[in-house]
Image (cartoon, helix red, strand yellow):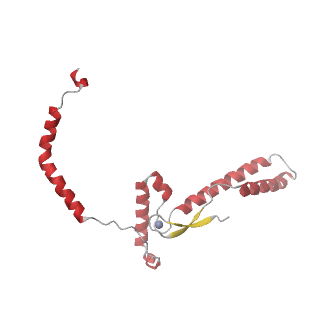
Amino acid sequence: MKTSLARFCAFCKSTRMVYSKKHVSLIDAFLALATSLLLSFIVWQEFDPRLVIFFALGLGLAEVFIIFRWRLSIACPHCGFDPVLYKKSPQKAAARAKQHLDARRANPLSAFQAPLNLPVIVKKPEASAQDHKVVSPTKAGKPAAAPAKKTNRPPTPGAMR
Ligand SMILES: [Zn+2]
């Protein structure tokens, strides 16, 4: 079973290796058991039921290590985009990617790295001009009519009491 897979970054579209394993497997549990048996024979020179402590400790450490390894590999090393952080807070993910890109820009060695395929935001000049035209007459003419409409409305049952 492969533990790391090539994945595309959702932001810069470059490939990166991501650990696919997120939790301990049966093999890890078996290895923790073998280690605890060995430690039991080293410490007490016999099979001792207290090896359960070593087993639980080994399994816990393995789980923490695997989670940390997966979490550190999930962020893109090229642009700094973190999909896990993006799911929690898109603003924080954008700030981190911006910080990473600023650091990359400031580093003169980045000239030798592969260029990033960052998304380009294209402004639509026609749509924005049209929006402006629609907004400006309403701003000039409508506000006088809007409060009048409010006052013409019959009072609500709650206000009559
Ligand atoms: Zn990226």
Q: Position of residue 113 (x, y in %)?
A: 47, 77
* Between 65 and 82, the one nearer to me in the picture: 82
Q: Position of residue 158 (x, y in %)?
A: 25, 24
**Within the image, what quadrant is residue 157 found in?**
top left
In the image, taking residue 102 as reference, residue 158 lies left or right, namely: left
In the image, taking residue 117 as reference, residue 18 lies left or right, namely: right
* Between 38 and 18, the one nearer to me in the picture: 18
**Residue lying furthest right in this view?**
46
How many numbered marks have been drawn onto this rendered protein structure?
A: 0
Which residue: 46% across, 79% down? 112
In the image, taking residue 143 as reference, residue 16 lies left or right, namely: right
Q: Position of residue 22 (x, y in %)?
A: 61, 56
* Between 91 and 14, the one nearer to me in the picture: 14
**Residue lying furthest bottom in this view?**
112
Q: Considering only vertical position in the picture, is 145 above or below 30? A: above
**Within the image, what quadrant is residue 122 found in?**
bottom left
Which residue: 41% across, 59% down? 94
The quadrant the N terminus occupies is bottom right
Which residue: 50% across, 56% down? 84
The quadrant the C terminus occupies is top left
Q: Considering only vertical position in the picture, is 87 above or below 107? A: above
Q: Considering only vertical position in the picture, is 151 above or below 34? A: above
Q: Position of residue 119 (x, y in %)?
A: 39, 67
In the image, taking residue 90 as reference, residue 29 lies left or right, namely: right
**Within the image, what quadrant is residue 118 found in?**
bottom left
